Image (spheres, rainbow, N blue to C red):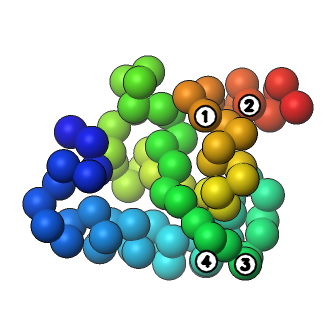
Amino acid sequence: MHPSAWPDGKWSVVREAVIIRDGHRCTYCGIASGPFDVDHIKPRSRGGKNSAQNLTTACVHCNRQKGARTPEEWMGAR
């Protein structure tokens, strides 16, 4: 299920918890100024789950560049 289809309010709670857990920083580049997305480390399109272990804080720039790749694939292509 896509996060936008979760019951009202649940995704916003998960999103905020992930951002707090990650110290309000992009886990890819370290920027702390946001805005932030919550990224699926293993993309959902490739079998990734909506679990906390598969979610991480990413700045909008990093999240858009990473796309549907794993962090290893994305970093290797840079």
In which quarter of the view is residue 77 placed?
top right
C-alpha gap between disc 2 and disc 3: 22 Å
Give whichever of discs 4 and 3 has the lower sequence position: 4
Judging by the rendered image, the residue that carries numbered circle 3 is 33
State the residue in front, 55 or 59: 59
Mark 3 secondary-structure assignment: loop
Judging by the rendered image, the residue that carries numbered circle 1 is 67
C-alpha gap between disc 1 and disc 4: 22 Å
Residue type indicated by callout 1? Gly
Judging by the rendered image, the residue that carries numbered circle 2 is 74
Circle on res. 23: 4
C-alpha gap between disc 2 and disc 1: 8 Å
Residue type indicated by callout 2? Trp
Residue at x 66%, y 60% (from the top left corner): 59
Mark 1 secondary-structure assignment: loop
Residue at x 80%, y 34% (from the top left corner): 75
Tell me the crowding category of disc 2: few under 14, some 14 to 19, or many 20 or more residues within 10 angstroms, Cα based: some
Q: Residue furthest left?
A: 7
Q: Are marks 2 and 4 in contact (CB under 8 Å)?
A: no
Mark 2 secondary-structure assignment: helix
Residue type indicated by callout 4? Gly
Q: Is residue 8 above or below residue 72?
A: below
Tally the numbered discs: 4
Give whichever of discs 2 and 1 has the lower sequence position: 1
Tell me the crowding category of disc 3: few under 14, some 14 to 19, or many 20 or more residues within 10 angstroms, Cα based: few
Eye-nearest disc, 2 or 1: 1
